Amino acid sequence: MTSTTFVEIGTSAVDRSKSQAMRRVARRQRLLFNTGAAVISILLVIWTILPIYNIVMVSLESQRPVQRPHLAG
């Protein structure tokens, strides 16, 4: 039994440039996807931590009322 392998001999410069262009496009898409995912992640972390921060800051305030009965007047 013999095995047959197909070997591409002499790829043309056009094929190589297409391949490189496709790699660049894929790399750019991956970079944009990762950047978008990072931005969304940061926004979600801020969205989650901000109320907790507010709770902690209100609990550390002095004994004055948190809600004022009336504004200026």
Image (spheres, rainbow, N blue to C red):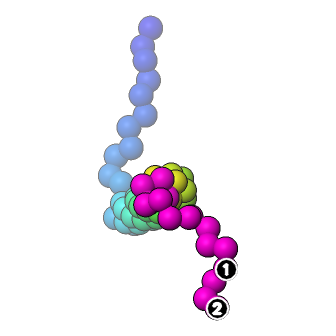
Kindly identify the residue that appears in the image at 67 percent across and 74 percent down. 69
Image quarter of the C terminus: bottom right
Q: Are marks 1 and 2 in contact (CB under 8 Å)?
A: yes
At mark 1, the secondary structure is: loop
Residue 72 versus residue 36 in the image, above or below: below
**Which amino acid type corresponds to the residue marked 2 in the rendered image?**
Gly
Q: Residues within 10 Å of mark 2 (few under 14, many from 20)?
A: few
Camera sees residue 53 = no
- Which residue of the protein is positioned furthest toward the bottom in this rendering? 73
User: Could you give the CA–CA distance between mark 1 and mark 2, rounded to whole angstroms?
Assistant: 8 Å
Q: Relative to the observer, which residue lies in front, 8 or 21?
A: 21
**The magenta stretch spans residue 47:** no
Magenta residues span 58-73
Instruction: Please state the horizontal and vertical placement of residue 55, each as a whole percent of the image.
Output: 52, 54
Q: Residues within 10 Å of mark 1 (few under 14, many from 20)?
A: few
Residue under pointer 2: 73
Residue under pointer 1: 70
**The magenta stretch spans residue 69:** yes
Instruction: Please state the horizontal and vertical placement of residue 30, each as a whole percent of the image.
Output: 45, 57
Kindly identify the residue that appears in the image at 61 percent across and 88 percent down. 72
Q: Relative to the observer, which residue lies in front, 65 or 24?
A: 65
Kindly identify the residue that appears in the image at 44 percent across and 23 percent down. 4
